[in-house]
Image: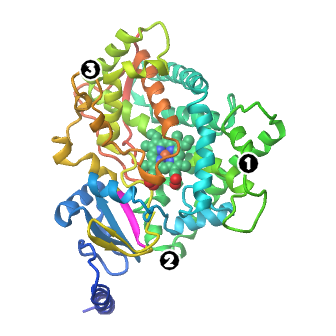
Amino acid sequence: MSELTVILEIISFVFLTCLMIKRIFQNRNKTYPDGPFGFPIIGHLPLFGNYPPKTFMKWWNSYGDVFSIRLGSWNTVVVNGYDAVKAAAEHPDDVFSGRPNFFSMDIYRKSVKEVTFAFSNFSPVYLKQKQLTSKALRSFTYKRPEIIEDLVTNEANAFADIIVKKYNRKFGPIELDVQTFATRIVYQFLYGRSKTVDIKTIIKSLEEVNELVGSGSLLNALPWLRFVMPRKIDKFVKCLVRSYDIAKKQIREHNETFTVGNVRDVADAIIATDVDADESRDKNVLTRQRLNLTLGDLQEAGVDTTNKTLSWLFLFMAEFPEIQERVFMEIRNIVGTERNVLLKDKPDLVYTNAVILEVMRIVTPVPFMLPHFSMKNAKLQGFDVDKDTVVIFNIYSVHHEEKFWGDPKNFRPERFLSDGKNLDQEKCNHVFAFGLGRRRCIGEEFAKMTLFLSFTTAIQKCKIIKPAGENLDLTPVPGLVYSPRPYNVLVQERY
Ligand code: HEM
């Protein structure tokens, strides 16, 4: 037996003994959720497999709606299925609305030198920041949607022209064009029309961040790995700083040109918002700097999600040409081909809405939301969840629950139609792609408008075609936001 094997056996023995002692003491008056057996030190991460949602579905079947795992040293519970997810995410005391102080989030805070919004723990300051930022976003989505409509349709028309020009004769990958398109929309929404955006830098930064921030990230589970891969950490920090520098530069420029009563974009709306104090060391005070930097979070969270969801929509349309044709026919019959699709057309384009919902359901681009954290000891579905436990909401399980959907593995947009003419509200309410509860996505309304206008404009103008006789690969690449594998299509102009 080699020395290494002996050492590993000793570590395993000590670990298991500690675990048993802990369980014995913990279990006296408490019922903890059960879970699969994991490895010492590293926990369950190596068991996640190539496609974690599939593994989690198996664990859900074996251990029930609430099961426990470990992400390295972090005690973690995974919440599955509609009932349990809804009960936990909408807990009346907001017990599960915190965020863990994961390594990646800690570097975030340290590099940006400010508590970032999306990764801050649940607190009165967080709530105020969310309320004020939502108000700034609503001043466009509800009060002046025509600004978003104009921005997105203009960009979507230009995007359609570009992909037709590039791919009408030979097959090619449209993902980079979709990325550029989504980035331009989010940045112009936040910082104003005709902003020049360094797309390549932004996209590169997002890829790095996507890899390191998710619930299944190796560095979060095993923070000591930073000593093994210091260059990776360095790169990550540089990306973050670069990204937040963009937000800071925009805020400076906006401050110089802002005039009261003329709110041009979200940055202006944030600047025009009152805070508790301009500067303070008190963590319980919402400062000007902290509110301003919410723009960095909107940037980070908005681009990749929108980009990847759109990429998924186009991939599914290429793979299911008869469904794409039905979407096109609905647009042609209701809107025609002479004018742009507008937000007022949304209630009439019922099948198109069903297709968007079905893609978001079957793929679930953010399957585990962002990691949550329990703020105090609490009960969940009869189980005890201690304070400081990481809580993963398995939204993928809600979207693939057989007892509700019947055939969740099939791509079937009609499932969202109640009588062939209307959307089935109960089914719509079972789609949690934007999360739920207090931590629900703050950009949801803007994202829904963008997805609808971009998708319909593109399908109205172009036909997306896959290589004859080929099946496109629909298995996602894991990350914080799950992306499609690279795919090639032909794009033909419709009219
Ligand atoms: C298709 C597009 C999008 C999807 C699928 C999506 C999905 C999500 C999900 C699942 C969460 C996590 C909720 C949780 O942890 O409980 C989230 C949070 C968040 N999203 Fe989105 N999102 C999208 C677009 C956007 C856009 C366009 C913005 C900004 C303009 C945005 C800003 C945020 C922020 C700031 C958070 C953190 C909220 C918090 O911690 O309170 N998202 N999003």
Instruction: Please give the label number shown on residue 274.
Output: 1
The image quarter containing residue 112 is: bottom right
Taking the magenta stretch, the answer to whether it contains residue 390 is yes
**Residue 100: % across, % down:** 49, 67
Q: Earlier in the sequence, mark 2 or mark 1?
A: 2
- Considering depth in this image, is 413 or 477 the residue closer to the camera? 413
Contact between labelled residues 1 and 2, with CB atoms less than 8 Å apart: no
Does 213 sit above or below residue 74?
above
Mark 3 or 1, closer to the camera: 1
Q: Is residue 251 above or below residue 394?
A: above
Residue 155 image-quadrant placement: top right
**Circle nearer the viewer, 2 or 1:** 1
Q: Earlier in the sequence, mark 3 or mark 1?
A: 1
Q: Amino acid at mark 2?
A: Trp
- The amino acid type found where label 3 is placed reads Lys
Query: Residue beneath label 2, please?
Result: 224
Mark 1 closeness class: few <14, some 14–19, many ≥20 residues within 10 Å = few
Q: Earlier in the sequence, mark 2 or mark 3?
A: 2
Q: Nearer the viewer, residue 339 or 9?
A: 339
The segment highlighted magenta reads 389-393
**Residue type, numbered disc 1:** Asp
Marks 3/1 in contact by CB < 8 Å: the verdict is: no
- The residue under the point 20% across, 67% down is 63
Residue 246 in picture, x, y percent from top left: 69, 47
Mark 2 or 3: in front is 3
Dot 3: what SS? Answer: loop
Identify residue for label 3. Answer: 421
Q: Residues within 10 Å of mark 2 (few under 14, many from 20)?
A: few
Image quadrant in which the N terminus is located: bottom left
Contact between marks 2 and 3 (CB within 8 A): the answer is no
